[in-house]
Amino acid sequence: MNAENVHQDTDLAAPDLPREPEDAAGSAAADSDAGTAFDTEAGALIEPAAEPGSEAADPEPLAPPTGTMSAERLAAKALEARLLGGERKLRRREVAAGAGLSLLSARKLWRALGFPNLGDEDVAFTERDQAALSTIVDLVRDGKLTEEAAISITRAIGQMTDRMVVWQIEALVEDMVQEQGVSDAVARKRLVSELPNLIDPLEEMLAYSWRRQLNAAVQRLAVRAEAGLQSSEEGREGDEDDAPLPLARAVGFADLVSYTSLSRRMNEKTLAQLVQRFENKCAEIISVGGGRLVKTVGDEVLYIAETPAAGAEISLALSRAFTDDEILPQARVAMVWGRILSRLGDIYGPTVNLAARLTALADPGTVLVDSMTAAALEQDERFVLVPRPAEDVRGFGEIHPVQLQPGSGRGLILD
């Protein structure tokens, strides 16, 4: 990029000083600077180009490594080149300049993705890194995303893929330990040579699943959101704490009984198997019931469904499944029909808090709902509703729990 493309007279993000020493506090301060994260003039570069011979000029290329690398190191290096799209040849300022934005703006996106901090002299990037940076920046410059939305979406991608990759690697290592009879350490080393055969099919499944999940989300947003709000009006005065929130959902919690005491008596392998069995069973029941598993935290799962009946079916199925399971303990389950706010892949609001409080009140192997949710289900023959004594609940005052039991019909059927 030549000097004609450099815009120094701008009130956007201030140019970064060349070779500024960087520590944790300095980086945080830089990221909190006022101003726009991206230069919205197509092709403009916020950061002035370094003059030849100046302090910011690129250092001499690093000397190539010497010595002979082991077969394991060679395999790891080849795998890295395939995953990153080539050899690391670029420094962070080069990547930012190639994408047409300041280093400050590039760092905001890299941190949103969860990348570690790097110095000016670290040769850590490839041309694919530059292309990825340009992709998200172009969405802002074309007016398709605001800067805030771009960073939020980038953070979602970084956090979700990080968790996904760790999950996949642990599953592969565990499988190798069991099937090949090797130690955990040996399995992790062998996995480097096994991964090249898995990259393409795993990547294909990721793209396929993302498209299917996006389509399902569109259906929830465009087709059923208004219907859910309308159905949630029944029995409400309009002044409830959750009245301003935009989505109507059945919110449920399932909590394993005596998990803490059990985990203290288990070795690492047995505990891992118990947690995996719990999460797998929850995920299967919730998906078959048409709900969405929001998150799992140790011995607890949070889920949502689009109607009170769907939430009730899932809740009863979860309670029944853990009661019948020969390994897992029973669960306390609660479900509340109300309004929520969905942000950052999580859900918030009084409805969520009330469902959590009810879970703590439920007896092992039972499902509790609140009185308003019970009113929404009382005409449905698939459910039996048994009032319980009133309880004083922190943050809500006196509430009237109702025990949910199966009525007519077969309930949720798992293949």
Image (cartoon, grey):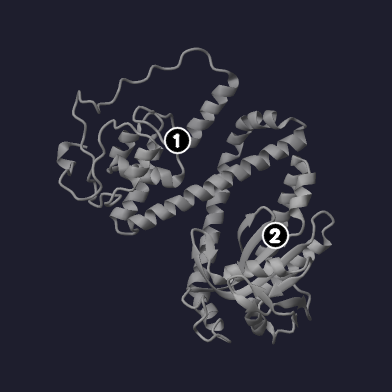
Amino acid type, callout 2: Cys
Q: Closer to us: mark 1 or mark 2? A: 2
Q: How crowded is mark 1: few (under 14 residues within 10 Å), some or many (20 or more)?
A: some
Residue 384, horizontal then vertical, whole percent? 76, 81
Quadrant placement of the N terminus = top left
- Residue at the spot 59% in from the left edge and 20% down from the top edge: 71
- Residue at the spot 29% in from the left edge and 56% down from the top edge: 142
- Residue at the spot 34% in from the left edge and 38% down from the top edge: 26
266 lies left or right of 153: right
Residue reaching furthest top?
A: 67
Q: How crowded is mark 2: few (under 14 residues within 10 Å), some or many (20 or more)?
A: many
Asked if residue 412 can be seen in this view, the reply is no
24 lies left or right of 323: left
Quarter residue 200 falls in: top right
Nearer to the camera, 236 or 143: 236
> Which element type, helix, strand or loop, lies under badge 2?
helix
- Residue at the spot 40% in from the left edge and 33% down from the top edge: 118
Quadrant placement of the C terminus = bottom right
Residue 317, horizontal then vertical, whole percent? 74, 68
Amino acid type, callout 1: Gly
Please tell me the numbered disc located at residue 282.
Answer: 2
| Mark 1 vs mark 2, CA separation in Å | 37 Å
Asked if residue 369 can be seen in this view, the reply is yes
322 lies left or right of 222: right
Please tell me the numbered disc located at residue 141.
Answer: none
- Nearer-N-terminus badge (1/2): 1
